[in-house]
Image (cartoon, rainbow, N blue to C red):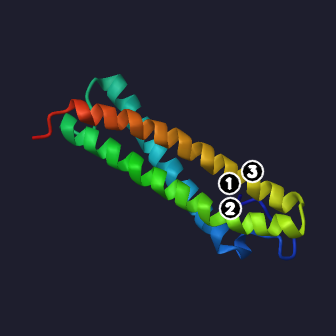
Amino acid sequence: MASNAHGGSHDFSNYPEYNYCLGISILAWLYTMAQVLRDVHRLGSGRDLIAARKTSAVVDFAGDQVVAYFLISGLSAAAPVTDYMRRAADNLFTDSAAAAISMAFFAFVAIGLSALVSGYNLSLEALV
């Protein structure tokens, strides 16, 4: 999405909705990389970076829920603008924006599935 600059008014930075969607996508990527690094550390060393297993389950579940909400919020902010622009002219700029929005949706689906697994793992923990 950040490379979607085709001159004139066709520059993603002119649209705050696209900036928001890009920012949320970056945050989702950072969260995912942190989870991957945490899992690699756990698999390599046999211990988790977050000491308590219960706390780890809560952090996983809450993080997945928050990131999923942010992703759906970002793509729902950018989708109407793209739809409006596509009615006037269907060009490379709107095609690139639509592709970025669809990738954000696929990321939402992946994080949503991860939230289901995290919720299941949380339900197995005795939190009291």
Q: Amino acid at mark 1?
A: Ile
Mark 1 surroundings within 10 Å by alpha-carbon count, few (fewer than 14), some (14 through 19), many (20 or more) = many
Residue 6 visible here: no
Outermost residue on the left side: it is: 128
Q: Nearer the viewer, residue 42 or 125?
A: 125
Q: Earlier in the sequence, mark 3 or mark 2?
A: 2
Amino acid under disc 2: Ala
**62 left or right, relative to 31:** left
Determine the CA span between mark 3 and mark 2: 11 Å
Q: Which of the two discs, 2 and 1, labels the residue nearer the N terminus?
A: 2
Q: Nearer the viewer, residue 21 or 42?
A: 21
Secondary structure category for the residue under label 2: helix
> Looking at the image, which is closer to me, 26 or 108?
108
Residue ID for mark 1: 101
> Residue at (75%, 50%) from the top-left corner?
99
> Mark 3 and 1 residues: CB-CB less than 8 Å, in contact?
yes
Tell me the CA gap for discs 3 and 1.
5 Å
Q: Element under label 1?
A: helix
Disc 2 packing (10 Å; few <14; some 14–19; many ≥20): some
Specify whether residue 56 is in view: yes
Up/down of 77 relative to 42, above or below: below
Nearer to us of marks 3 and 2 is 2
- For the point 26% across and 39% down, the residue is 56
Q: Which x, y percent locates residue 87?
A: 85, 66
